[in-house]
Amino acid sequence: MLPPELPPLPALTRAEGELIDRYLEVVDLLGRINPARGESTYGGLRAAQALVGKSAELREALTLMHQRGESELHQETLTRALRVLDGERRARLVTLPPPPPS
């Protein structure tokens, strides 16, 4: 049996696509650094080192959008794109895990 088909990615400009991709890469790295979820200092260190470059790429994506006159973020469209790309699960790794049952 095949897994359910994901909804299509909404139409994005190239710059919006870059923004979403770079944002999710930063979120993934922050999830790996999160001390409440991390497993080793070395893994967190490697993620923190990579975060510097990925943050610069995120800044460049936003700069490019601004320079092209894309001054507004279309929240509804970008939210749909983040959901299709599993952004909710990925962003949860940045937060604290739920407390254990008491």
Image: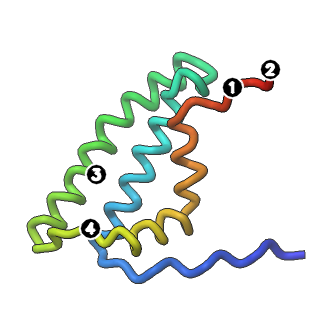
Q: x, y percentage for residue 60? A: 20, 54
Q: CA distance from mark 2 to mark 3?
A: 41 Å
In the rendered structure, which amino acid carries the disc numbered 3?
Leu
Give the residue at mark 4.
73
Q: Earlier in the sequence, mark 2 or mark 3?
A: 3
Q: Which mark is residue 87?
A: none
Q: Earlier in the sequence, mark 3 or mark 1?
A: 3
Q: Earlier in the sequence, mark 4 or mark 1?
A: 4
In the rendered structure, which amino acid carries the disc numbered 4?
Leu
Characterize the local packing of mark 3: few (<14), some (14-19) or many (20 or more) Cα atoms within 10 angstroms: many
Q: Which mark is residue 102?
A: 2
**Left of 22 or right of it: where is 10?**
right
Pointer 2 with pointer 4, Cβ within 8 A: no
Give the residue at mark 3.
58
In the rendered structure, which amino acid carries the disc numbered 1?
Pro
Q: CA distance from mark 1 to mark 2?
A: 8 Å
Characterize the local packing of mark 2: few (<14), some (14-19) or many (20 or more) Cα atoms within 10 angstroms: few
Q: CA distance from mark 4 to mark 1?
A: 35 Å
Q: CA distance from mark 3 to mark 1?
A: 32 Å
In the rendered structure, which amino acid carries the disc numbered 2?
Ser
Pointer 4 with pointer 1, Cβ within 8 A: no
Give the residue at mark 1.
99
Q: Nearer the viewer, mark 1 or mark 2?
A: 2
- The residue under the point 79% across, 25% down is 101
Q: x, y percentage for residue 61? A: 24, 59
Pointer 1 with pointer 2, Cβ within 8 A: yes
